[in-house]
Each structure stands twice: as structure tokens, then as C-alpha cells.
Image (cartoon, rainbow, N blue to C red):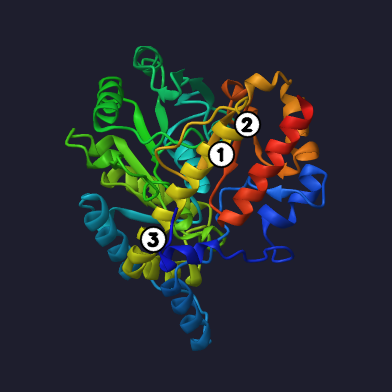
Amino acid sequence: MMTNSKIDKFDTVIARHNSGSTKWDDAPALFGSKDVLPFWVADMDFPSPPAVNEALAARVQHGVFGYPSPHSYAYDAVTDWLDKRHNWKTNPEWMVSTPGVVTAITLAVQTFTKPGDKVIIQPPVYPPFFSSVHNQDRIVLENPLVYEDGNYYIDFDDLAEKAREAKMLILCNPHNPVGRVWSRSELTKLVKICLENNVLLLTDEIHGDLVYTGHQYIPLASLDTDSDDKIITLTAPSKTFNTAGLYTSIAIIPNSKLRSQFSQTVQQLGISKSNVFGITALEAAYRHGAPWLDELLVYLEDNAQYLTEYIAANIPSIKVDKPQGTYLAWLDCRNLKLSQQELVQFFAKKARVGLNDGVTFGHQGTGFMRLNFGCPRPLLAEGLKRIAQAVNQSI
């Protein structure tokens, strides 16, 4: 296990109760237990990088919080990060600021499709993919992932068939909740199918920086496929640097016509202004957060290894494969032989841990639960211990 003091700093447990935290302060009402340990909402229980906190403190010290100007300096930071970290050359002119990736998904669906149009998603997948389509009176076309030998794959035959009648596909790269980091060949094949059928690609790449040993995040739009006119990339520092509460994200749209249409929707809805603290944190994170992230990735991967080994040794009736990316574990609980309602109640009431109900990611999540291991090891260890005790008492 780890001995590096720079990494062990992530072991420190910081109290988040009564801090206005959705993850912690809403958990007792949601799960019906005051002592439930929350592993649900996808934010981490770690402080943001020192560079981010220092930049925010300096901005507070300045004391004047008027409307921010167009923030080309922030876009430059995003461009530099994507180039150095992921070998993707972008242009600040391609970027549009949005108050969150979920908001941006809804904006894109509203802008580029019409009521009644069909939008492909690949369940089990992040629940807002469903609601962003349904709430705009569009139709969800499911291209379910195939689960084989402990891993998930894209069903390309089904995708090719569905693409004939779709206007848009919403991709999750890396994938939430199953933790797949899509390979270059998989992404290339997906783009080819969409281009052949004139399907616009909207790709949520918010977990792109959180990828583990042996895998590589490849930005979809970085592929040499002449697909710039058909790809809109959504990203943010929020998952990487734990800044979700600052609601600052970026839509990267190389095609000027699509970018103009998207920007017009943003303007019409009156959400074109960014939060001055979100801008400050974004720039500091992308300019100075790399060393911190490198340390975090080691800790998260060790957490993932600890989780998978603990469950295999102590809770064999639950199956889990180490994710290739994200800080989310997708637990296969079907051997517990519980209905989904019973499964949710089992974790909340008997194990006293708050996990995400697998069915919220689509009916393909029946029998599954999602666990967020982006937390100090002592919290993770306690949560797994509670699950093991509850399962063993029920056998």
C-alpha cells in the first residue's frame, strides 16, 4: 500500500456535515438514516488543489466581485491543458462557457433537435442523459451497452441500426457509471457510424482526466476522422479538481455555425455570464493543478484496487470490476437475490451506506448499485465494512 506522504494526505477526513453539501447534508432524509455514510453524489471528499484555494482566496481578498469580462485567459488555460495532457489541439474561439455539463447537454438537445426527434444514449448511463432528452419532448433511443465477462462494450450492430433514425447521440467518455474508457478503435467506429447517418455527436468528457494505469482517455474530437462539423465536446474541471459547486463548464464546438446556434440559445436563456469564482478556479486548476492531480490519481487507483480486493475477499456475493476510469464503482448485486427496492433498502437501512440506485441509470442497472470511492481511505474502509457485515448477517 501507499507510503508516500504527499499521497497519504488524501487520507485526512474532513467533516462535511452542515456545510451545505448535497452529498452529506441531504443523505439522512434521502436514505432514512442519520448515521448513513454517503457514497452517492459524484463529488469527492478531498479539498481542491492548493493552487485553486489560493487563487480563490486572492480573489476574495481583492474584494470587488463585479461582472467578469470575456475570459479568454480561462479559455487559453483549457486549450493548454488539453494540448499538454491529452494531445488535443483546440482553439479558444471554439469555446462557449456554460454553468455545468448537465445544463450544456440540455442546451444542445434544445438547440440541435426538435420535439419528436430521436436521441441515442447508451445505458446504463448517467440519469440526466435521459431527462435532458425527455424534458425537451424528444425521444430516447437506447443503444444498451453489452455486459460480457465483467466488462461493458458498445453494441455497434444495434448502433448502426438506431443511427438511421436518430438526430443526435450523447456519448459518455469515460463512461459513468460503468467506468469504461473507450478505446481509439471503439471511438473511431462510433464516429464512422454517426457520420454515415448524419448524427450529431454530443460527448460528455467530464471524467476524462480520471483514467488509470493501462488506459488512455482519447478526446472524441481529437480523432483524425474529419468529424469537426459533427462533434460537440462538453468538459469541466469539476470532477477532476472537485469544484462542482462553482458551476463552470466549457462546450467546445469547432464548427462555427453550430457554435453560433449554441451560443444563441445560451444568450436567449440569459445564462451567458460565468461566475467570477468559477472562472478563477478553472484557470488555476488547469494552469497549476497537474502535480496535485498526478498524486490524486495514484490515491484513487489504490482506492479502486482496495475496493475490488476487499469485496472479492469479504463479500463474494457482490461482484465488481476495477474501473478503467472515474472514481465510481459499479456493484453487481444480483447474487443477493433481492428486488431492486429491497436492494436499495438493504444498503440504506441494514448496511447504513448511501449508494446510487442502479435503476436510475436505466433498467439495465437492475441489480446494480453505484459507489463513489472518491474519498479518504478510512471512510471507504468503514463503508465496505458495513456492507460486509450486513451481507454476512443476512446469509
Q: Distance between the residues labelled 3 and 2?
A: 29 Å
Location of mark 3 (residue): 295
Quick one: 387 or 63, which is closer to the camera?
Answer: 387
Q: Quadrant of residue 172?
A: top left
Q: Distance between the residues labelled 1 and 3?
A: 23 Å
Amino acid type of the residue that numbered disc 3 sits on in the rendered structure: Glu
Quick one: 215 or 7, which is closer to the camera?
Answer: 7
Q: What residue is rendered at 51% in x and 37% in y?
A: 308
Amino acid type of the residue that numbered disc 2 sits on in the rendered structure: Ile
- Pick whichever of labels 2 and 1 is earlier in the sequence: 1
- Pick whichever of labels 1 and 3 is earlier in the sequence: 3
Q: Name the quadrant of the C terminus.
A: top right
* Residue 315 numbered tag: 2
Q: In this view, does 231 lie above or below 66?
A: above
Q: What residue is rendered at 31% in x and 70% in y?
A: 73
Q: Nearer the viewer, mark 1 or mark 3?
A: 1
* Circle 3 residues within 10 Å: few <14, some 14–19, many ≥20: some
Q: Quadrant of residue 389?
A: top right
Q: What residue is rendered at 17% in x and 36% in y?
A: 224
Amino acid type of the residue that numbered disc 1 sits on in the rendered structure: Tyr
Q: What is the secondary structure assignment of the residue under circle 2?
A: loop
Quick one: 317 or 124, which is closer to the camera?
Answer: 317
Q: Position of residue 297 (x, y in %)?
A: 40, 53
Q: Position of residue 276 (x, y in %)?
A: 48, 72
Q: In this view, does 269 lie above or below 63?
A: above
Q: Where is residue 110 in the image (x, y as percent from the top left)?
A: 49, 38
Q: Where is residue 232 in the image (x, y as percent from the top left)?
A: 34, 41
Q: What is the secondary structure assignment of the residue under circle 1?
A: helix
Number of callouts: 3
Q: Distance between the residues labelled 2 and 1?
A: 7 Å
Location of mark 1 (residue): 310
Q: What is the secondary structure assignment of the residue under circle 3?
A: helix
